[in-house]
Image (cartoon, rainbow, N blue to C red):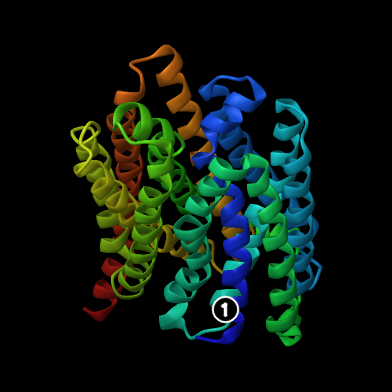
Amino acid sequence: MPLALYALTAGSFGIGCAEFVIMGLLLQVAGDLHVSIAAAGMLVSIYAFGVFVGAPVLTVATRRMPRKAVLIALMAIYTIGNLLCAVAPNYEILMVARVITSLTHGTFFGVGAVVATGLVAEDRKASAISVMFAGLTLATLLGMPAGAWLGLHFGWRATFWAMSAIGLVAMAVIATLVPRSRDAHVPATLSEELRGIARPQVWLGLAMTMLGFAGLFVVIAYIQPLLVRLGGFSESAVSPILLLFGGGMIVGNIVGGRLADRWPTPALVGTLLALATVLGAMSFALHSTVAMPVFVGLLGVAAFATVSPLQLRVLRKAEGAGQNLASSFNIAFFNLGNAFGAWLGGVAIDHGPGLAALPWIAAVVTLFGLGIALVALRLDARSATPATTVVATACH
């Protein structure tokens, strides 16, 4: 794999920290700012919704800029947003700062995925995507528990100061390692890009992305209260348990990329089914101090095994001119799923069956994503049949 891919990994690590660390800080933020846990959970949803809005808007706005310059500028915005989080005097300002930070997320991963796949041969594209997304998994393995530890011992603001420093380092690494020669491209017209993402199969891919990851975030957005209030763990135990989730994400990311390179369709269906199964089974482990950490690790594996198959499908269905925008749209829909999942979990806690119901609610949501995947694959088969018939007729 080219060295430039690991520069993208560094950037994705920083941005991944911004997305995930808040989940290990909910109790501290809620207590310090005098809001409920569900309100603190909205800091997850608003970030994800900001990604959903920002990804297509910034992708279109920066489409004529060199891709390296775009990536560096996005990391600069990320750094500013985290600085604002660190000094936010109240809940409302923290919410605005989270939105500013989130605007960079989708475009970074969207443009980065296109750059990554352009650096390697056709049979390594899914693996290249998984290398870039490895930064996201490392953010969960290292950043999420480290952020929770910093928040516990030095206050939640210390975590955002640390992420600001990470942003500066990532900017330097990208500026050094991503070659300027990769920026030499003639952008497609906006109408060509819009036609590329207008295909029904692209939108079915976006829908399965959203629902698949919504299931994950129904649970993971509230993992701290699940572990502390139902699992019986101390707050200091949350960080090491989150290490298991991050380790699982790394394994799942690698496995998902390799499976998608070899068998893209079975990988798509199999990973979504595995995620729904783990979420459903977690319902029976909530009160077990032995089983719950195991399921947290399995959840990381199952969740991030879906990333490369989902991203690769959307890229292939968009084709050509639509890939840049479609890639960012798919990241946006990952985060729309995150926002919806965190919101749905908050509703279940405040107005529904409560914390204990989150895993089975998550499993049902993910099964809807699997259902859309099966519909899309059936449409693939139907569209291929007429072409096969025509060829067979011509041969006779």
- Which image quarter: residue 64? bottom right
In the rendered view, does 165 fall on the left or right side of 355?
A: right
Q: Position of residue 189 (x, y in %)?
A: 75, 64
The answer to whether one can see residue 273 in this image is: no
In the rendered view, does 65 fall on the left or right side of 154?
A: right
The residue that label 1 is drawn on is 5
Q: Position of residue 155 (x, y in %)?
A: 62, 40
Task: Relative to 157, say whether 107 is above or below.
Answer: below
Query: Among all residues in the image, which is located at the extreme front?
Result: 153
Q: Position of residue 372 (x, y in %)?
A: 35, 43
In the rendered view, does 309 fall on the left or right side of 103?
A: left
In the rendered view, does 19 fall on the left or right side of 284?
A: right
What residue is shown at x 36% (from left), y 26% (from top)? 229
What residue is shown at x 30% (from left), y 25% (from top)? 356
The residue closer to the viewer here, 284 or 52, is 284
What residue is shown at x 62% (from left), y 60% (from top)? 14
Task: Relative to 380, say whether 212 is above or below.
Answer: above
Task: Relative to 309, say whether 153 is above or below.
Answer: above
Please, what is the three-letter code of the amino acid marked with disc 1? Leu
Query: Among all residues in the image, which is located at the extreme top?
Result: 351
Q: Position of residue 224 (x, y in %)?
A: 43, 36
**On-image quarter of the C terminus:** bottom left
Circle 1: element type = helix
- Which image quarter: residue 278? top left
- Which image quarter: residue 166? bottom right
Mark 1 surroundings: few (<14), some (14-19) or many (≥20) residues within 10 A: many
The residue closer to the viewer here, 382 or 54, is 54
The residue closer to the viewer here, 242 or 353, is 242
The answer to whether one can see residue 351 in this image is: yes
